[in-house]
Each structure stands twice: as C-alpha cells, then as structure tokens.
Image (cartoon, rainbow, N blue to C red):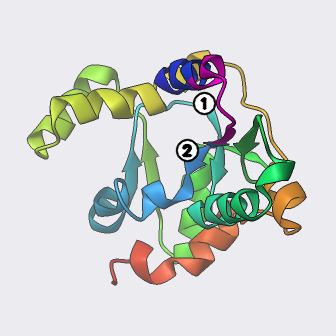
Amino acid sequence: IPHHKIERLIIDSGISYTFLRPAYFMQNFTTTLRKELVENNRIFLPAGEAKFTLVDVQDVGKVAAETLLSSDKHVNIGYDLTSNGTLTVGEMAKKLSRGLNRKIDFVSPNLIRFFIQKRKEGVAPMFIFVMIMLHYFPRFQKTPNISHAVQEITGKPPVSFDEFVRNNVKTLSGGG
C-alpha cells in the first residue's frame, strides 16, 4: 500500500509525526457511489463477502483537530480510525434499505463486468483500478481490526453506519 511506504519515509526522516489511518469512508456513499445508489437503487462493487471497517469523515476531522490541539500527546503515533464494527457491502445495502425506506441491492460483479460497466459510465481506467483495489482485494484479506482511537481521542463514540445513513437521508435519496 502506498501509504505505508510514505509513512516509512517520514519515520526514517526523523521528523515528528502523527499518522491518521482512516478506514473506508462512509462518505463514499454520498460521493463516488451515490449516482448508482440513487439512480439504480444498488451498490455495484466487486466486494463479495469482504468485511470492511468504516469511518465517518467527521470523526476523522474531530480526531485531526484534537491531535493538532494537543500535539505533544500524539507525537510519533499512528492511529487507525474506524467505527465500532465491520460490515460487508451486502450488510451496508440492508442498512441503507432500512434507513432510506427503499430496497437497495448489492451486486458483486466479476472484474471484467465491473470494468466494462464502469467504462460505459465514463469512469477513467485508473480510477476503476483504484475501485478494484479498494473493493475486490479485501476479499482475500483477514477481517480488519476495529480501533477505539476515535472515542479515546475525542471522548465520543464514532458515528455508526446507521447514524451516517440517518444523517444523510436527503443526499442518499437524490436530494441536495
């Protein structure tokens, strides 16, 4: 993963650092995945039954603010930032269905079908490869660990996926 290489360079440089390592952004559903969700009521990703840890970018921002305000407490430390659980994309689809009060399907295509569909939609090949890296390769990795860093640093529990859906019903339903 390129981030690890960059972290290694920073560590080896001898400068002070604080690494924030966010999990899969919940906001992918209000940005990159939104059109498919709104227009086709589906999530179309080659994720299979892979488990993901997620994080709301608001929690990432709160942790970043705290680490900057109290930087002496966070010198030369890396934090994995997650919510309090893991979910498959199929489980996310069920939670979206409940929260949006409409059926959201999860379709896990093979890589060729995924690539062809995304090209038809005008997605750049390099971005398709990034999407494959983020969604397909986790199928072959162990379930990611849950971190409690958000709560430990901010003093508040991280946003759950259900809460994220509730907070974004309008956007996830096609509104502004």
The spot of residue 110 in percent (x, y) is 34, 23
Q: Nearer the viewer, residue 86 or 57?
A: 57
Magenta stretch: residue 73 in it? no
The spot of residue 90 in percent (x, y) is 57, 45
The spot of residue 156 in percent (x, y) is 85, 69
Mark 1 residue type: Ala
- Is residue 114 visible in the rendered image? The answer is no
Q: Nearer the viewer, residue 7 or 44?
A: 7
Q: Which residue shows up at 64% across the image and 49% down it?
A: 54
Residue 10 appears left or right of 169:
right
Element class at badge 1: loop
Mark 2 residue type: Val
State whether residue 5 is above or below residue 132: above
Comes first in the chain, label 1 or label 2: 1
Pointer 1 with pointer 2, Cβ within 8 A: yes
State whether residue 115 is above or below residue 121: above
Q: Which residue shows up at 67% across the image and 38% down it?
A: 17
Question: What's the CA distance linking mark 1 and mark 2?
Answer: 8 Å
| Residue linked to disc 2 | 89
The spot of residue 155 in percent (x, y) is 89, 67
Magenta stretch: residue 14 in it? yes
Q: Neighbour class for label 1 at 10 Å: few (<14), some, many (≥20)?
A: many
Q: Which residue shows up at 42% across the image and 25% down it?
A: 133
- Is residue 96 visible in the rendered image? The answer is yes
Quadrant in the picture for the C terminus: bottom left
| Residue linked to disc 1 | 50
Q: Nearer the viewer, residue 42 or 133?
A: 133
Residue 121 appears left or right of 76:
left
Magenta residues, start to end: 10-20
